Amino acid sequence: MYQNLKYILYHGTIATIEKIDISQGKGRKDFGKGFYMAVSRTQAVGMMHKKYKEAVRRSRNKRDSDFTEHLYQIELDAVAVKTLKIRFFEQADEDWLDFVLMCREKRGTPHDCDMVIGPTADDDTMLCLKTYWDGLYGTVGSSEAKRILLNNLETENLGIQYFIGKQEVADHVIKSMKEVDWR
């Protein structure tokens, strides 16, 4: 598994980041509350643009120019990564889906993994998840309902993300972080 890991990752945001602060993460995300990084620079830029548009839409008294977009390149320490308890999902299958459903239903980080790596079910998937939880795909928890949900998520289009949910892990494993030009 370690031979497939990536050690240069990206994070797109509208916030200036001096130091990663896990407590700033939002709850009920794919792998829990924490810090997310994308393998693909393109995916991180897309998330950054999405966050920007959402912030502008939600802020009634601010102008577009009140927000700035930032892309960070993050290097992980390869030796430190090998000491972590990592949950690795190679594909968006039923095991991955069960994990995402658990994390999105519960607050915080409802697992003891130091790092989770796997496909991204971004916030656009919440409509599909709500439809699943409402029982419109069939009995919640059934293999049939999960199969329909996985099909509707268009899992072949999902990027890969890395998640860290503990501050001490972030401090231990992140070797460097620098802002890079996203244009």
Image (cartoon, rainbow, N blue to C red):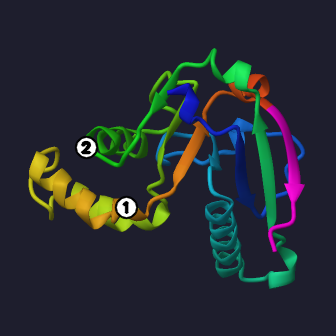
From where the camera sits, is residue 177 visible?
A: yes
Is 177 included in the stretch rendered in magenta?
yes
What amino acid is found at the position of numbered circle 1 in the picture? Answer: Glu
Numbered label attached to residue 156: 1
Q: How many marks?
A: 2
Q: Position of residue 139 (x, y in %)?
A: 9, 52
Above/below status of 147 relative to 101? below
Q: Secondary structure at mark 1?
A: helix
Depth check: give the residue in front, 56 or 120.
120
Above/below status of 36 relative to 4? below
Numbered label attached to residue 94: 2
What amino acid is found at the position of numbered circle 2 in the picture? Answer: Glu
Depth check: give the residue in front, 120 or 23.
120
Above/below status of 159 relative to 99? below
The quadrant of the image that shows the C terminus is bottom right
Q: Secondary structure at mark 2?
A: helix
Depth check: give the residue in front, 14 or 182.
182
Residue in the image at 72% along x and 59% along y: 12
Q: Earlier in the sequence, mark 2 or mark 1?
A: 2
Q: Position of residue 102 (x, y in %)?
A: 35, 39
Q: Main secondary structure of the magenta part?
A: strand
Q: Image quadrant of residue 176? A: top right
Tell me how far mark 2 sits from mark 1, CA to CA: 14 Å
166 relative to 181 in the view: left or right: left
150 relative to 176 in the view: left or right: left
In the orientation shown, which residue stands out farthest toward the front?
3
Depth check: give the residue in front, 153 or 25.
153
Q: Which residues are magenta?
A: 175-183
Q: Position of residue 157 (x, y in %)?
A: 42, 65
